[in-house]
Amino acid sequence: MGLALLSALLCLFMLWATRRVTRGRKWWLRLGAAVVLFVLFVWLSPQVYYTYYGFLFEDLPRQLVIGDPPGPGRLAQLMTFSWRANLSAHSQGLLGWAMILTALWRQKHPPVV
């Protein structure tokens, strides 16, 4: 239950951040920002989940579990649902598409100066 809640909160936060960062920008800047935010999520979210597991399992060593940022190939595989056939990879792909749609959705807010 906690893992599902953490995943939902991360998803909502990333969609909110995408909306906030892209407000009032030109479409190509919104698209670029969504992709950058998606890269950051794919790269850094394993550490968030590992920290959550650290709260559950006291003997889990504290360590960094993030590696190099994902490259364009892996991002393309995530977005086309061909990375790995598991819920985590498919959820990341869905989040990537949701972030792009959120960024490109017409916004009625004034431009950010």
Image (cartoon, helix red, strand yellow):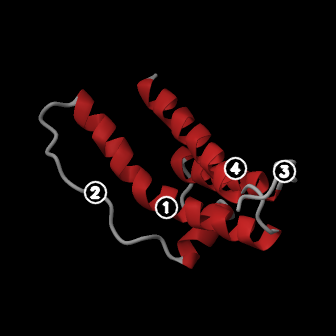
For marks 1 and 3, the one nearer the N-term is 1
Pick whichever of labels 3 and 4 is earlier in the sequence: 4
Query: Tag 3, which secondary structure?
Result: loop
Q: Is residue 108 above or below residue 1?
A: below
Residue at (52% x, 40% y) in the render? 10
- 99 to the left or right of 51: right
**Label 2, on which residue?**
65
Residue 82 seen anywhere in this rendered image of the structure: no
- Tell me the kind of residue under disc 4: Arg
Q: Is residue 12 above or below residue 86?
A: above
Q: Residue at x 67, y 71 (%)?
A: 32
At numbered mark 1, what does the secondary structure look like: helix, strand or loop?
helix
Q: Up-down: is 14 above or below 31?
A: above
**Residue at image coords 77%, 73%:** 28
Q: Position of residue 46 (x, y in %)?
A: 38, 51
Quarter of the image with the C terminus in it: bottom right
User: SS for tag 4?
Assistant: helix
Q: Residues within 10 Å of mark 1 (few under 14, many from 20)?
A: some
- Rendered image: mark on residue 107: 3
Quote the CA–CA distance across marks 4 and 1: 15 Å
The amino acid on which the numbered mark 3 sits, given as a three-letter code, is Gln
Q: Nearer the viewer, mark 2 or mark 4?
A: 4
Give the spatial CA distance, label 1 vs label 3.
23 Å
Task: List the residue tagged with mark 1.
Answer: 40
